[in-house]
């Protein structure tokens, strides 16, 4: 059944666009009874999920200002892998100069893997159709002028003969063919040394850095490091990570953009940049030679194609790419310079996409307005051991956090009045901490109770066992599950497993250890692909620790079921483990996330690991029985704990004793895994609070806190 979902109270132009959709699809079965308008996007998303599960064809229409943000949430809700569509990119490039564009090119190009794209005339706000949960989801903008071509594409795909349907993405980018190098070494330095020097001076003056991806062209700059001394303080170099199967589907420009963004993130520089090799494309007998320059800054990532049709200019094409790169960086730094003064700071903030801001407000209002729901009771208790090396939330107190939120609507702590937990807007690829607003009460008190409303179970880093099981039931393979939770790692095959693994001081047969640990962590009743993902994580974690594990590393001791033994045999026969940049990855795991994962740094501190940067979606965890829990403690009990565990003497109004300093917004803008909180003037991490202070009585460090004065 064909259904159309949109919002109530649309702008006049958007309402006209809805009418155009209805007229276009009326003859194909879209009736008035199948058109629904909702008060919020959250309500619309939930209804769409139910309709998809029933096998319906859902058309979701959003206004332009919200369109790209809506796509982002859909990717998270449906666990869709997003790629940059080469079709959309080519369409946009034919109408706009990407280096000068004021819009977010990446956001407009983002579509799900293996979807069908519905192009607009200029590429902006292009829609798509993808299979999901037994039905199909089509996302279109409410753009009266742009949507004619998109509607025609939808009709061809869904109702025309199969041979007329548009091809699904990803598709090869044009007919581009990589050309052999024009010269083995860099050309004369005069071709690009001056623009490189100017870029270095601009970076040094702004006290910023750039990270360049190693490649045939950027290595020319690398060779100048002994000549240009400013390079040591202003330029980093990074090797691109190993390519995955999904990467092979990318176009050349999309791959370069990804590498530029990854370089910036890994080095924490202001810019990441990459330059491609040369390509050629023959159309209608004419050959075009070109290369790409990709630049990522803290807000956007864009690629520019440098063209020539003259074969005699090939020797100058790549040096010209270096000049374009350097000139663009200098322009960006010059444009940002005024924003460094306090009075110009608000102008810098206004560069944020208007659509994203409006959508964030909508999501926040939806969270406030959503009816409260009752907590489900937990039937098991988590042990209290705590160690940075402990990985499983079911056997240790992983990282704990608290968030203080005053004036909850209910004064009955045990009733579990919580906002609905489906407002998922995950960051990609990591979740950044934000400062928490101070919490105050209007009437000072001398005693009362603290109630912690907790989301998830465990430290929240890496693989969610419940989330993995959910994904497996949706048809995901173990490799896709691992790629979701350990973002950017490479699945390696052919490893030779050792005969034994030392666990808690005792050597165990590797096969028996892995099978018992797998049964203890997840049980053989879970989906096979989820078990296989967990088995790979178990072995990789052991390999990372040189096959010597403490007792709190993971659960162990249960007799392995036939299902777990079979999975371990498959993993060992294939020699599977995860790596990152050629080294064994660290693969923590936990029971239930707070809807998306948190970062390694949030829980254990130290150096950040890019593949454990948090923000990975785990939507199935919202449906888990143990997703929410509560813990209540009197102010007198907490006062004693603070004195005993932290040496802090608490006095005055208990409402002022606990203050959340920062969190990662895992649940909403106001609730997340706590990075830091202040207790009576002493700052502790969320992990320390949950494990060492509260001794694991709080199941996750993603929570909000209500203080209720004694009547």
Image: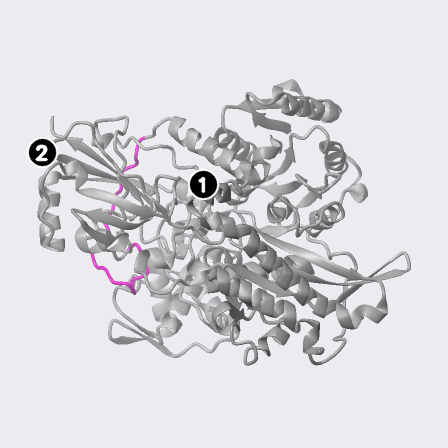
Query: Is residue 662 toward the left or the right of residue 345 in the image?
Result: left
| Residue wearing tag 2 | 446
Quick one: 536 or 78, which is closer to the camera?
78
Query: Is residue 303 toward the left or the right of residue 296 in the image?
Result: right
Query: Residue 316 appears in which quarter of the rendering?
Result: bottom right
Q: Residue furthest top?
A: 32
Q: Determine the secondary structure under disc 2.
A: loop
Q: Determine the secondary structure under disc 1.
A: loop
Q: Of the two numbered discs 2 and 1 on the same chain, state the one appearing first in sequence.
A: 1
**Position of the C terminus by quadrant:** top left
User: In this rendering, is residue 328 above or below 103?
Assistant: below
State yes or no: residue 381 in magenta: yes
Residue 510 position, x and y percent, is: 37, 73
Residue 248 in view here: no
Which numbered marker is on residue 521?
none
From which residue to which does the magenta span run?
A: 374-394
User: In this rendering, is residue 451 above or below 384?
Assistant: above
Quick one: 227 or 382, which is closer to the camera?
227
Quick one: 530 or 244, which is closer to the camera?
244
Which numbered marker is on residue 424?
1
Q: Nearer the viewer, mark 2 or mark 1?
A: 2
Residue 137 position, x and y percent, is: 62, 37
**Position of the N terminus by quadrant:** top right
State yes or no: residue 362 in magenta: no
Residue 280 in view here: yes
């Amino acid at each position: 059944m064909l259904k159309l979902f949109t919002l109530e109270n649309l702008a006049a132009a958007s309402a006209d666009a809805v009418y155009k959709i209805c007229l276009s699809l009326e003859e194909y079965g879209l009736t008035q009874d199948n058109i629904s308008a909702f008060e919020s996007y959250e309500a619309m998303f939930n209804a769409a999920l139910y309709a998809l599960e029933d096998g319906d064809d859902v058309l979701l229409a959003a206004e332009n200002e919200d369109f790209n943000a809506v796509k982002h949430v859909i990717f998270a809700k449906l666990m869709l892998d997003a790629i940059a569509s080469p079709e959309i990119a080519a369409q946009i490039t034919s109408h706009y100069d990407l280096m000068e564009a004021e819009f977010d090119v990446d956001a407009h190009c983002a579509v799900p893997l293996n979807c069908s794209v519905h192009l607009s005339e200029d590429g902006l706000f292009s829609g798509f159709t993808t299979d999901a949960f037994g039905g199909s989801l089509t996302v279109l903008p409410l753009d009266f002028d742009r949507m004619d071509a998109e509607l025609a594409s939808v009709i061809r795909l869904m109702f025309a003969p199969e041979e007329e349907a548009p091809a699904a993405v990803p598709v090869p980018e044009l007919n581009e063919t990589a050309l052999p190098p024009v010269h083995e070494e860099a050309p004369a330095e005069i071709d690009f040394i001056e623009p490189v020097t100017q870029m270095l001076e601009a970076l040094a003056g702004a006290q910023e850095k750039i990270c360049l991806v190693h490649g045939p062209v950027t290595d020319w700059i690398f060779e100048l490091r002994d000549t240009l001394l400013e390079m040591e303080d202003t330029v980093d170099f990074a090797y691109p990570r190993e390519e995955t199967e999904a990467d092979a589907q990318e176009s050349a420009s999309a791959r370069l953009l990804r590498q530029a963004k990854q370089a910036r993130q890994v080095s924490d520089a202001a810019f990441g940049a990459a330059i491609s090799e040369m390509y050629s494309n023959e159309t209608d007998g004419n050959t075009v030679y070109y290369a790409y320059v990709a630049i990522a800054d803290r807000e956007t990532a864009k690629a520019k194609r440098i063209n020539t049709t003259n074969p005699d200019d090939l020797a100058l094409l790549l040096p010209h790419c270096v000049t374009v790169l350097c000139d663009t960086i200098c322009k960006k730094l010059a444009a940002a310079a005024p924003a460094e003064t306090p009075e110009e700071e608000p102008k810098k903030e206004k560069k944020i996409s208007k659509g994203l801001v409006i959508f964030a407000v909508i999501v926040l209002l939806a969270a406030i307005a959503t009816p409260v729901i009752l907590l489900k009771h937990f039937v098991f208790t988590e042990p209290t051991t705590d160690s940075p090396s402990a990985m499983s939330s079911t056997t240790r107190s992983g990282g704990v956090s608290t968030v203080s939120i005053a004036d909850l609507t209910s004064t009955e702590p045990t009733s579990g009045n919580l906002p609905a937990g489906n407002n998922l807007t995950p960051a990609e690829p990591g979740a950044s901490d934000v400062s928490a607003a101070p919490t105050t009460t209007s009437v000072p008190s001398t005693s009362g109770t603290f109630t912690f409303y907790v989301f998830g179970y465990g430290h929240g880093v890496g693989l969610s066992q419940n989330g993995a099981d959910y994904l497996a039931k949706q048809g995901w393979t173990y490799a896709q599950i691992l790629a979701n939770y350990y973002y950017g790692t490479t699945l390696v095959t052919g490893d030779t497993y050792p005969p034994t693994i030392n666990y808690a001081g005792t050597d165990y047969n590797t096969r028996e250890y892995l099978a018992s640990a797998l049964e203890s962590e997840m049980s053989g009743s879970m989906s096979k692909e989820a078990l296989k993902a967990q088995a790979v994580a178990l072995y990789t974690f052991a390999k990372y620790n040189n096959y010597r594990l403490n007792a709190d590393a993971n659960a162990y001791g249960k007799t392995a079921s036939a299902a777990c033994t079979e999975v371990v045999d498959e993993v060992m026969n294939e020699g599977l483990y995860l790596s990152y940049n050629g080294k064994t990855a660290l693969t923590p795991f936990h029971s239930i996330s707070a809807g998306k994962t948190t970062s390694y740094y949030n829980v254990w501190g130290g150096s950040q690991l890019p593949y454990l940067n948090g923000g990975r979606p785990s939507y199935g965890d919202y449906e888990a029985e143990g997703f929410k829990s509560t813990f209540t403690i009197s102010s007198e009990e907490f006062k004693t704990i603070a004195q005993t565990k932290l040496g802090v003497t608490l006095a005055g109004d208990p409402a002022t004793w606990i203050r959340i300093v920062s969190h990662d917004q895992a649940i909403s803008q106001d609730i997340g895994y706590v990075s830091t909180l202040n207790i009576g003037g002493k700052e502790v991490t969320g992990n320390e609070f949950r494990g060492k202070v509260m001794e694991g009585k709080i199941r996750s460090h993603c929570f909000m806190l209500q203080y209720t004065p004694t009547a």
